[in-house]
Image (cartoon, rainbow, N blue to C red):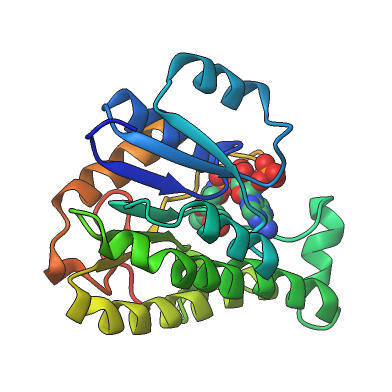
Amino acid sequence: MSGNPVMCVTGANRGIGLELARQYLADGWNVIATVRSMDISDELAIVVEAYPNLRIEQLEIGDAESVRALAERLSGQPIDLLINNAGTFGPLPFVENIQKQRFGTVDLDVWSDVLRVNTLGTINVTEALVDNVVASDKKMIVTLSSGAGSIGGSDRTAMAYTTSKAALNKAMTIVARTLQERDVVVAIMCPGYVRTRMGLGGGDVDVDESVAGLRSLISGFTMADSGTFRRYNGDVIPW
Ligand SMILES: NC(=O)c1ccc[n+]([C@@H]2O[C@H](COP(=O)([O-])OP(=O)(O)OC[C@H]3O[C@@H](n4cnc5c(N)ncnc54)[C@H](OP(=O)(O)O)[C@@H]3O)[C@@H](O)[C@H]2O)c1
């Protein structure tokens, strides 16, 4: 990898993760993009063709052995910016899934799986790669959470998804305070309601605009931003 900064993004096979990889590569960064399966999407294959400074790595964030193996492969590799992007809304199809996340018909197995990936998996990846971040120049960790995890929100559905993000938010504020002494900025961000697979056919914002907003904010982050929760447009989100 060249002397330019290194960004590592999880869940880069599609959606926001793919666009984060694409925009940082276009800006000259070296990018490590993780995917669940090395049988990558056509969209990611096009990016692989275009950018030699892109490294693809396999990672299933809910699998502790997969996380450990990635950390071993990346041992000694500084990471200026780690973006925890990988996440799940729960199993498809959506209509059945949403029923399983509604109070009254909650499916505890679905809830447990979503927590294991979105909350435990994200924290596990962060722990596994923290020394790589500390060894870099910029020392930043950004986690994509969701405004849907805000306790004061009015959601009546998606019990598994929203609680997984609420718990992730709390955990990341602890990570932020813990890593302050190692000069690492830890920010929590919501990309907006984005037109991706997770957006389920809806959305208020296109993925390129959301990612441009996230990148613009990230580029200005200092230690004063550590532990904060912001939307892609800069709005502060109440917990
Ligand atoms: N879209 C929205 O409106 C929205 C709003 C708020 C927050 N977010 C957050 O933004 C992030 C990205 O969302 P998105 O809209 O881009 O979703 P997406 O289109 O569904 O893409 C999710 C990505 O995460 C990967 N992934 C899922 N589970 C994983 C696991 N266990 N291990 C490793 N990778 C995994 C997927 O891999 P595969 O390609 O193999 O499935 C995919 O590449 C998520 O954390 C999400 O919660 C999204």
Residue 199 in view: no
Q: Is residue 229 above or below residue 95?
A: below
Q: For this rendering, which residue is in front, 201 or 8?
A: 8
Describe residue 182's horizontal placement relative to residue 151 as left or right.
Answer: left
Q: Quadrant of residue 39?
A: top right
Residue 17 in view: yes
Describe residue 210's horizontal placement relative to residue 110 as left or right.
Answer: left
Residue 153's x, y, as percent? 48, 74
Residue 198's x, y, as percent? 63, 47
How many labels, in total? 0
Q: For this rendering, which residue is in front, 108 or 106?
A: 108
Describe residue 26's horizontal placement relative to residue 18 as left or right.
Answer: left
Describe residue 175's horizontal placement relative to residue 9 as left or right.
Answer: left
Write the residue at 35% across / 44% down.
7
Residue 80's x, y, as percent? 28, 51
Write the residue at 80% across / 57% down.
91
Write the residue at 22% across / 71% down.
226
Q: Is residue 30 above or below residue 97?
A: above
Q: Quadrant of the N terminus?
A: top left
Q: Is residue 57 above or below residue 61?
A: above
Q: Quadrant of the C terminus?
A: bottom left
Write the residue at 43% across / 76% down.
169
Residue 163's x, y, as percent? 59, 78
